Amino acid sequence: HGYGVEAVPTARRRSRAPSVDEPSRWARLFEGHRKYNPDKSEWRTMGAGGSRRASIIEDGWQPQTKPDNNVQLECAGVSLPTYNDPQFSKIRAGLNIPDSFLFDFDFNKMGAGGGKGGNLLAIHGDYVVKEMNTTDHNTLLNCAKLYADHVLMEDRNGNQYGTMLCKVLCHFYDPETGKNFMAMDNVTPNPVPPGLGDKGRRPSANRSTYDLKGCADDKTLTWNNEKVNEVHKRVWNAGMWCGQCLWSKERKNYYAGKLNAANTDFHVTETQKEKIEMWIKRDCTFLSDLGLMDYSLMVSCLTLERDDPDAEAWLNAAAGNEDSVPFVSMYDGKVQVLHVGIIDFLQDWTFTKNIAMCIKFLECNKATIPPGWYAARFIETFCWKFNADAQEVAAPVGV
């Protein structure tokens, strides 16, 4: 299969995440990480694992549930009404993104995003535009202010805490189709060395991307820039359950990619690991307090030989600033560039999810578990998966 890891059975996967028969341990783990939430005064919580919705009482903010024609977004050459844009405009301003960033977007380029819901998605430069289902739309409506405050929250010295959550840049409505959309930053863009601009947007043969949840749903999306096609073992497909002898080549490759994703570690510096752990703990606490689960950690790993011209450009740009995304470091004599980010974090813990968890009672490491348990497993898995064994980037000669 070419992944460079042994295709071991599921039972032998290296995973420190506890199985679902340990909810008390997960609850203890989660409560131990709550100290990473700098300010809980705005959140009404109900203990680890409970479904809850934050309420803002102190300033009387109420979500704008109808499209606002008075605050419109220039998208695809037309003006489209938005939802709660005063919150998202603060995020755009903090990232120096102009309000016109979607002016030349083309809705006709949207295609199936690959998720279970089949919603449309398109990559537009450094941004992703996604069609929203009803659940995600309602969650973002109600959590817009809390989300913006979390992303932009500063410490007493005026420095932002930082976050791994993808940055939602706008939430808007298209009257022509009657659908709702969101635009966000692309957390795993094609890694372009700083200063090369669009001329540097060339595929890299040694770049791999992963979609990770810390459970049996982990998967490899691309390996050495080659897409890994998804072939699922659905319950109604009896042939899939009769041993690998009946699997297609694509199914075997997909399964090998899942094992590769479960077993792959990522190498960062000590400073980068501290930052990653702080962000993961802070973000997971925030999401659990909102009753959200089923989110993924996206990781893009680019490895370059030291004499590659792109490697020199990355090293020069990252010198003295290696603790920000993308994380650039030296490992095993090579330059590596890591993009990381948490996506798909708008899923509520609903009655339907509760039923799904019961139906999957034989699956011991499933994604469908309550928010507090999900957060604890996510924290435990990914604080371990990033190893602090890479070398920091040295300052370029003459600087």
Image (cartoon, helix red, strand yellow):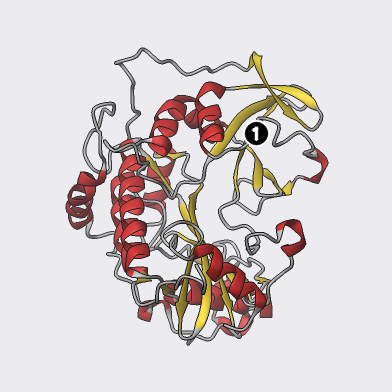
Q: Nearer the viewer, residue 309 or 209?
A: 309
Q: For numbered disc 1, what is the local secondary structure?
A: loop
Name the residue at 60% across, 85% down. 2
Residue indicated by mark 1: 98
Measuring from the top left, give residue 357's x and y in whole percent.
38, 50
Relative to 391, is 129 on the left or the right? Answer: right
Measuring from the top left, give residue 186's x and y in whole percent.
60, 50
Other residues around mark 1 within 10 Å, as few (<14) / some (14–19) / many (≥20): few
* Placement of the N terminus among the 4 image quadrants: bottom right
Relative to 341, is 158 on the left or the right? Answer: left
Relative to 373, is 163 on the left or the right? Answer: right
Mark 1 residue type:
Pro
Measuring from the top left, give residue 102's x and y in whole percent.
72, 36
Measuring from the top left, give residue 53's x and y in whole percent.
35, 29
Name the residue at 64% across, 27% down. 172
Name the residue at 27% across, 43% down. 49
Q: Name above or below for residue 63 compared with residue 252.
A: above
Q: Nearer the viewer, residue 368 or 183?
A: 183
